[in-house]
Amino acid sequence: MVADSTITVDGHEIPVVTANTVVVGTGAAGYCAAARLVQFGTEDVVVVTDKIRAGASRNAGSDKQTYYKLTLSGHEPDSVRDMAETLFAGGSMDGDIALAEAAWSPRTFFNLVEAGVPFPHARSGEFIGYKTDHDPRQRATSVGPYTSRTMVEQLEKQVRRNGTRIIDACRVVDLVVESQGPLDELGRREDDGLGDREGERASRVVGLLCLRTDVRADDERSRFLLLRCTNIIYATGGPAGMYADAVYPHGQWGANGAALRAGVHGKNLTEWQFGLASIKPRWNVSGTYMQVVPRFISTDQDGNDEREFLTEAIADYGRQMSLIFLKGYQWPFDIRKALDGSSLIDLLVYRETVLRGRRVFLDFRSNPVQADFDPDQLSPEAYEYLDRAGVLGLGNSTPIERLQHMNRPAYNFYLERNPQIDLEVEPLEVAVCAQHNNGGLTVDQWWHSNVEGFFPVGEAAGAHGIYRPGGAALNSGQVGATRAASYVAARRTEPPVGADTFARLAEGVTTAALDLLREANQRAVEGDDNTDGLLREATELMSRNAAVVRSRASIDEALAQVKQWLDDYGRLLVADARSRRSVNRLFLIRDIITSQYVYLCAMADYLDHGGRSRGSVLYTDPDGTLPQAGAGEDPTVELDLPEIFRFQLDGGALADVIQETVWDGENAPEFVWRGVRPIPSDDEFFENVWRGYREDRNIH
């Protein structure tokens, strides 16, 4: 890394790298943005990342990781408007974003194809598809369990061929922002709070402060790095570090806290996606892992006292097997399927792990409930699927035999991990894990936030609604990155602020970071490093109080604790400056509990507005209903389950509005509930569109 200049803050000489645009993150969205910027003519680009080989895009996946796009095969009709309507129907979804994601899905899909991602096509060239969750067509495609990894690898090759500077080992500490004067009390314009014309936003980003995690205490180099820029494309992923039980890969943390502290608005922060996943390694147990109908067992913490716990609530043999099978397609927890459907299994796993303190395993060595596998007791849907897959011809098979027959690579996946797990000889530990934040940082149709020059893309952006089709996140990341790069190249090519102005604006956040590190290190003389302990305590608190099951009491309890940690942070943390890990954790944990605080406030505000259970979350309601026995038993009988599982469906009551979060980094967050932006009815007369395109390529 070669700095362009330095500034001196409190006696410390801090290197400064200057560029028109800084891309933060080296996942699929970040590399796409960096490559597209050069393609569109903006070559003054720097990419920074905390760890090039980390991140969800490169290291996460599932049985058949899905990419969602417009239908490009077969005789079934589809259109941009139809796909936009599907995305919009997820609830609390802005229609202009839905239309952009639909309209540019072919463009970004074919960009990946030309980059070398081997999406399958038929002999005639049709890119075949299949139906995924919340998908009325067959828009989904895949290159296997590592679809997003393949995307990252091919896009990275483009960025490196372009010669774009990539700076590794940079932890985001704070944005450097200049106030431009408020528009109103919330810094919003009259329509949607984002603004399309320059000068309408209340503040603009001018740079970024990072911690160099590869610099040792005795190194002559500064531990901090400043980046001076006109634009930031923020591809940091979702706030994965908020939860202990998470399927996000190790090393994926997110950096939403820094953006929220700088005044970037939040959007739909309450909306997460949860599902069953193995915890070592972290991996979704969707698809074939469930369709082969494994046995669910729980043990105490020492691995003793084995119980087949699903039978406590789902006594009917055929129904239990059918619900396990359905978790293959219905993998995310869906509150609409919790009353008497497949998501009841997630709640029973949650009861074992969170409420009873036990461990849960998938056992592929033997069949559930009884030794012999009886497919005649399956639902017609499950029976037909397994019959077509050739499983029924195996006779009295075990789950591992069915898995090896249907999907040998799914079995091999765990054999190839370190440490190796052989599903033939040992069970697989699982939990209900956070998997994706459907909300995030607010964006407009060009993925421009309320802070001028700041573009969240990928999971960092709040581009989704309550529900979304499986694979829509990968499409959204590519479309958002491409549209942000298009906007920057067309509208935001001016040089960064002058060096003196930048030094003045950066002094505050840099001084605060230096003070935080100095004071935390001084306390290390008197006590042991406490960063790992606080990280564990904070993430476990969120998984226990504010994950897939939440209540007013649990949210309030977590909020009080996190607020105390945040208020006391400058006096609480003990970090040894001689340890790069300790210093890294010092700034990482601050970002995590910042996000936790704002997200918990959003959850409390959601309940204040009458919010009930929806999406992938159960909100406890004393006046609600417990899950019921369902088909095969008396469907009106409530199961003997904890009262925290009593809920009422939201019924779409808040599906036509969006909760936006506004925070100044000091006072309590404020919340604005606005109507969703409808799907635009643009003028489709060719001559009019062509005229606008000739003038400014319709980028405005």
Image (cartoon, rainbow, N blue to C red):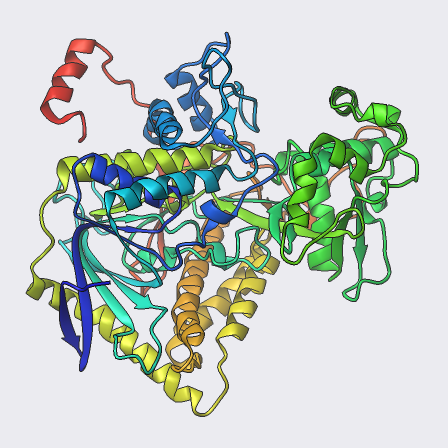
Total labels drawn: 0
Name the spot of residue 647 as percent of width and height, x first.
65, 43
- Is the residue 29 above or below the residue 576 in the image? above
Residue 229 in which image quadrant: bottom left
Name the residue rendered at 40%, 46% in the picture.
27
Name the spot of residue 633 as percent of width and height, x first.
86, 31
Q: Residue furthest bottom?
A: 526
Name the side, left or right, on which 127 lies relative to 296: left
Q: Residue furthest right?
A: 371
- Is the residue 344 above or below the residue 297 in the image? above
Can the viewer see residue 445?
A: yes
Residue 259 in which image quadrant: bottom left
Name the spot of residue 628 as percent of width and height, x first.
77, 37
Q: Nearer the viewer, residue 442 or 92?
A: 442
Can the viewer see residue 675?
A: no
Name the residue rendered at 80%, 36% in the picture.
401
Name the spot of residue 554 as percent of width and height, x first.
58, 59
Name the side, left or right, on which 622 lies relative to 594: right
The C terminus: image quadrant = top left
Q: Nearer the viewer, residue 623 or 21?
A: 21
Q: Nearer the viewer, residue 372 or 355?
A: 372
The N terminus: image quadrant = bottom left
Q: Residue furthest top?
A: 75
Name the side, left or right, on which 68 lies relative to 286: left
Name the residue rendered at 87%, 35% in the picture.
316
Residue 555 in which image quadrant: bottom right
